[in-house]
Image: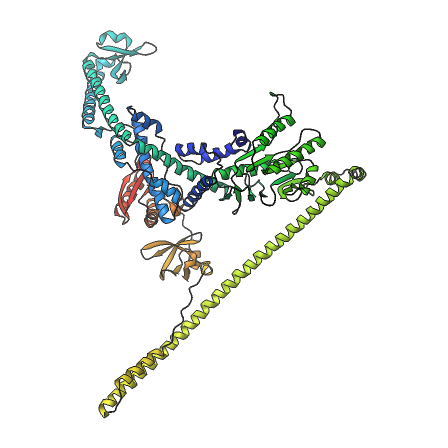
Amino acid sequence: MDHKILNTMDYYKMIQKLAGHALTSLGKAVAEQLKPSSDLSFVKHSLQATDEATKAYRLKGTPPFRGIADLTASLKRARIGGTLNPAELLEIAETIRSGRRVKKHVLQLHSDDPIPLLHDIADLLTEHKPTEDAIFACIDDNAEVMDQASPELASVRRELRNGESRIREKLEQMIRSSSVQKMLQDAIITLRNDRYVIPVKSEYRSNFGGIVHDQSSSGATMFIEPEVIVSMNNKLRELKASEEREIEKVLQKLTAAAAEVSDDLLADGEGLGALDFAFAKARLGHEMKATLPFMNDRGFLKLKRGRHPLLAADAVVPIDVELGNSFSTIIVTGPNTGGKTVSLKTIGLLSLMSMSGLFIPAEDGSQMCVFDAIYADIGDEQSIEQNLSTFSSHLTNIIRILNAMTPKSLVLLDELGAGTDPAEGSALAIAILEHIHRKGSRIVATTHYSELKAYAYNRNGVINASMEFDVATLSPTYRLLVGVPGRSNAFAIAERLGLSQQIIDHARGEVSEDDMRVENMIASLEEDRLSAESERQSAESLRKELEQLREKHAAEQQRFEEQRDKLLLRAQEEAREAVRKAKLEAEQIISDLRKLALEEGASVKEHKLIEARRKLDEASPELHKPKPAANRSGKSAKIGPGDDVRVYSLNQKGSVIELSGSEALVQLGIMKMKVSLDDLELLKSTEAVAKQQQPKQAASLKRTRDESVAMELDLRGASLDEALIEADRFLDEAFLAGFGSVHLIHGKGTGVLRTGIQDFLRRHKHVKSYRIGQYGEGGTGVTVAELH
């Protein structure tokens, strides 16, 4: 796709918005390299990935991409034998850890609701935990090599600390001496050239042996290393050199371990970048309220309330456009500032976005086409440097388009034929349009020429369109009307502004009869359109009213069926009781008959008695089973926090803790769970009691993400009691959601909240273990809990 066209269509501005939603440098790099594709299968594949990421983002939020870095440069240097510094090694370990978490998150999402494309990417991510553990065991959160990195390093640093202590003790003895203090500028110990020195007044230089390492800018102070500690400083320097050698050995060992898995880590970087890019597309679509377009390669385009994504949502006017079915050419007429150019750019930009695998800001059901190329001539192309007029510049651009376009191209032309004599300009515009139309390309063109209205009216496959203009307010509405040519509003505007009626009548007389017929035809079409629009709105109103009546009827029918079922159950219970009594009486009679047969020798056969009992059993009626209610939403309308309810699906009684949209958090014994309001029956309301109680002021607790999908809980600012209640509920939700670990953010502060939280976690039934957050997780301000 031509760079100039992409720039004209504001495509690069959209790419920058997309890149801004990426959470890693890897995802941002993928976004910045995005280009439209003319391959239908590839575009559908890209849109499917966006759709899966959108579904995952809506259900569980964004995977934990924090800590992922681009390791390309570091790993390439490691592979050729270079030694990585501690910060680079720490980046590698954090990326391995974050990659493992992202993989777990995506695979869990796939098990809950299939997202096959994202699953395939995540499944290929490797998990090199030994390398990760080795780096974290040697390098701390501040990218410093720790003492335990090797026994030799630990030994050298012990000697260093002891040597420094001895030197400080020696110097402190000196500066505490009254005879020495008077020769010192300040009674302090400082460092110069990594050697311990004391500040001596310049006039007492000769009283001190040793080495002068520096002096103040005024020359009044000399920084002297006393002779008694020269040998001690020398030993210290030797130990520091040994420390550097041991650190180098540790870094070389860790670099070699990273180099061994560099191929996997580079491949993981590509996978993580692809996943971050997919979720960036999902977040961008969510921000724009965009939808998934249906794609085709047969030149058909149908936009339903399409909006330009770079204009403010409250200011943009949606457009409806259909192209490539009954007609392949749209000619848009209308006054300046009416929105013609914006409509043209909207069609072009949304086409480019869909061809790039992005959702488009339009209603569901919109269809977009994969074109082999999109060509545009929009805006003032006048070039002073090339000594070209506006007309010449436009024509040069159009000639380039005519030479390059194919039947599968989309051509967008703004103000076709402008900049020259109207008669010649309109004739040239018609000829250009006719050539493109015969070629089979899809075209949307804007123009001022009224001759093009007649051309569109008489040519099959070509249709007029216009930008609506409100004569009452003398302003455009920016609505695109396909099928209605633009009409001249000059006379109406002049009349409303107060121009003399005599002048207006004279002007009308100067207009040719053919032009007046065209204007009258357009006015008639406009009147018919407004009438049809009014009828459509009335029909829509009736449809909504019928829908409400249907829902009301369905609710009444459900209530009737429930009442019928209750009456039938009551009647059946009464019938069952009557049959039970009759059976008892019959059993008593049969028992008396047996006694009679035994006492009097009567010939009552046993099998006849059994047959009689069977017939009595069969007399028990078949009970009617009520149908399950299809929708109980009516019963949930009055449910509030504190109410006693029954959960239909579990047949359990519980108490409502809180409401969240169409769901309620219900306490069922020792278990808390979220239940749809449609699945609840109100047993006892506490509304009257609640009204008498004064609301208690509570600390504000905020979750770092949406409560239903949170993996982190922010408790800063809460009291300990409030924090424990919130943490208990959070752990229950995380356990039910199947999370392996969660982060509780308590801050550093005085440590009271951290101590209380950790003591609570130690006794909690869902917590397997806990630890203080590591580098990149928040340090001592965060506690990480591992769940069973």
Q: Position of residue 556 (x, y in %)?
A: 50, 65
Q: Is residue 657 placed above or below 509 in the rendered structure? A: below
Q: Nearer the viewer, residue 452 or 145?
A: 452
Viewer-side residue, 276 vs 744 = 276
Q: Residue furthest bottom?
A: 600
The answer, for residue 367, to whether it is visible in the render is yes
Q: Residue at position x 69%, y 47% from top?
A: 525
Q: Residue at x 34, y 10 (%)?
A: 218
Whole-percent x and y of residue 56?
A: 41, 45
Residue 601: image quadrant is: bottom left
What residue is at 36 percent from the left and 59 percent from the top? 654
Q: Is residue 703 visible?
A: no
The picture places residue 164, in percent across and down from the top left corner, at 21, 21
Q: Position of residue 676 (x, y in %)?
A: 41, 55
State the residue lying farthest toward the front.
438
Would you say 446 lies left or right of 106 here? right
- State whether residue 161 is above or below residue 528: above
Q: How many marks?
A: 0
Specify whether 299 is left or right of 499: left
- Horizontally, is 755 left or right of 409 in the view? left
Q: Quadrant of residue 145?
A: top left
Residue 635 vs residue 479, the one in the foreground: 479
Q: How is the image coloured?
A: rainbow
Q: Relative to the observer, which residue lies in front, 192 or 40?
A: 40
> Residue drawn 60% across and 41% down?
328
